[in-house]
Amino acid sequence: MDWKRKNTKTVTVGNVLIGGGNPISIQSMTNTSTADVKATLAQIQKLAQAGCQIIRLAVPDFEGAAALRSIVTSSPIPVVADIHFDYKLALASIEAGVHGLRLNPGNIGGRQKVKEVALAAKERNIPIRVGVNAGSLEKDLLEKHGGICPQAMVESALGHIHMLEEEGFDQIVVSLKSSDVICMIDAYEQMSAFSDYPLHIGLTEAGTVRRGSIKSALAVGILLSRGIGDTIRISLTGDPVEEVLVAKEILQALHLCKRGFNFISCPTCGRTQVDVEKIALQVEDALSGIEPPFPVSIAVMGCAVNGPGEAKSADIGIAGGKGEGLLFCKGQVVGRYANADLAKALLDHVQILLSTEQITKT
């Protein structure tokens, strides 16, 4: 199924196109000290290998800004500088060659300073993400709307956008983040009706990997299913690589990612004759560093009730049975193996399929 996406403007971040019907890109943020070039580049490399396409770095001081030049030069993916409070950090980041800025025009020191940043970004053709966060809304908007609410967030974003537009700047991406699922969804839906700037969607401060993944899947998944969203970041407390993996799963589940593995495995029950969890985890781990440039579905099933049907529907799958199980490839039985050998047989055939490109590319 293809979701009908809202038509938005196209903004370029390095070599990644955001909006305009382009593929939804995945972002993350480093949690190393930006001043530590070696550690930051090592983390960026891991994130890129996991599937991250744009990386954001906090720039809290001029030591971090100075490190950006080396980081940008060596980064395999576009780098966005995250700026708060000091417009000079934004100017220094632009000078260092970053591919984009994330800032709140309302907290960098007034109209003249916003103008300086906008002119510098325009000269370098660098986009700016107007990042509105429910936890840091302007005091007058909180008073006007009686507290944090989607309407206040949208009004804040529109005010910041207008500030940039008055300086002739329109290379804008917008985010309206909240830690509340309903508030976040409502804010993005309202913003989508008011503006055609591309939207960076995500639930901020979502929580730990388990809880945050669930809440983020709900919030981001609902918006994407309604055609809203051009780039995503899943904010989790933990290794940022997990953010990228969760984002990929969300896009895969909604058929918005035209590459990579889609894993299917049964929840098990009293009929199960094999250790489905063990096999499924073994298969996932073995294929974690591989991403085919086309979609591949893999099924690990545990019994003869639904197993053969699901395994046949996948590009490649196994269905365990009493003592032995079947291996299916594109709907056909291609082997019968002892349960202990099913995982290896499946992985061997995945490699064959990938190397011979026998899986239909879509």
Image (spheres, helix red, strand yellow):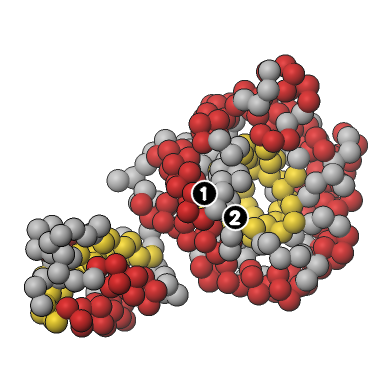
Q: Which residue is mark 1?
A: 212
Check disc 2 and report the residue beneath it.
Answer: 237
Q: Which residue is more in the foreground, 178 or 175?
A: 178
Q: Amino acid at mark 1?
A: Gly
The residue at the point 82 percent across, 51 percent down is: 90
Q: Residue at x 13, y 81 (%)?
A: 337
Crowd around label 2: few <14 · some 14–19 · many ≥20 (10 Å): some
**x, y percent for residue 129:** 68, 45
Residue 353, quarter of the rendered image: bottom left
Contact (CB < 8 A) between labels 1 and 2? Answer: yes
Image location of residue 118, percent across then percent down: 80, 43
Give left or right: position of 155 versus 208.
Answer: right
- Residue 99 can be seen in this image: no
Residue projecting furthest to the front: 270
Q: Quadrant of residue 140?
A: top right
> Circle 1: is it few (<14), some (14-19), or many (20+) Cα within 10 Å?
many
> Whole-percent x and y of residue 47?
57, 67
Helix or strand or loop: what does disc 1 sit on? helix
The kind of residue on which mark 2 rests is Thr
Residue 33 appears in view = yes
Earlier sequence position, callout 1 versus callout 2: 1
247 or 230, which is in the foreground? 247
Q: CA distance from mark 1 to mark 2?
A: 8 Å
Residue drawn at (48%, 61%), measured in percent from left and top? 245
Q: Name the spot of residue 293 as percent of width and height, x first.
A: 39, 68
Q: Is 1 on the left-hand or right-hand side of 186?
A: left
